[in-house]
Amino acid sequence: MAMSKAAQEIEAFFERQRLHSAPAWRPEPGGMLVGTVVGRRMGQDNGFGEYPVIIYKTEDGNYVAFHAFHTLARDILKRIGVADGARHAIVYSGLVKKASPTEEEIKKGNDEYHSYYGEDLDKPDASTEEAFTL
């Protein structure tokens, strides 16, 4: 039986609410997120500026929000793109010591960074080839 227009509007409203309230992905080192991009928004400025939040629908039908406030996370999203329908795999490797931190970075406790790796699963090689130049 077909839904009424009012019922379809209510269903769409609750779907948008589910997207908006998607829980944050909070990975442990080695944690992996695999999903399809279904939404984007900017996260609130909590003293470090706004940052991108990408909403994914996982294969089990749940929604999860990737809060890309770490520099490397944002760089990965720039590289692989965030078009609706893109299928991404992102791995969080945890905190990694910088290879050659400055003395200033060491004093300030900025000698580590949050490491991520990500790909668009539909075009895994494209993101590296596009950025490569000689």
Image (cartoon, rainbow, N blue to C red):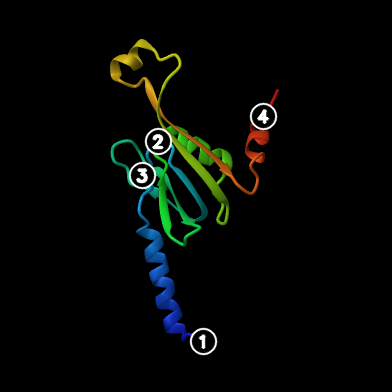
Q: Position of residue 27 (x, y in %)?
A: 38, 42
Mark earlier in primary sequence (4, 1): 1
Task: Label 1: state its secondary structure.
Answer: loop
In front: mark 2 or mark 4? 2
In front: mark 4 or mark 1? 1
Which amino acid is tagged 4? Phe
Mark earlier in primary sequence (1, 2): 1
* Placement of 96 over or under 34, stated as above or below: above
Disc 1 marks which residue? 2
Q: CA distance from mark 3 to mark 2?
A: 10 Å
Seen from the viewer's position, the closer of residues 88 and 10 is 88
Task: Label 3: state its secondary structure.
Answer: loop
Spot the residue most to the top.
103
Snapshot quadrant of residue 12: bottom left
Q: CA distance from mark 4 to mark 3?
A: 31 Å
Q: Are marks 4 and 1 in contact (CB under 8 Å)?
A: no
Residue drawn where x is 43% and y is 19% of the image:
98
Mark earlier in primary sequence (4, 3): 3
Name the disc covering residue 132, or none: 4
Disc 2 marks which residue? 29
Q: Are marks 1 and 2 in contact (CB under 8 Å)?
A: no
Q: Quadrant of the C terminus?
A: top right
Snapshot quadrant of residue 22: bottom left
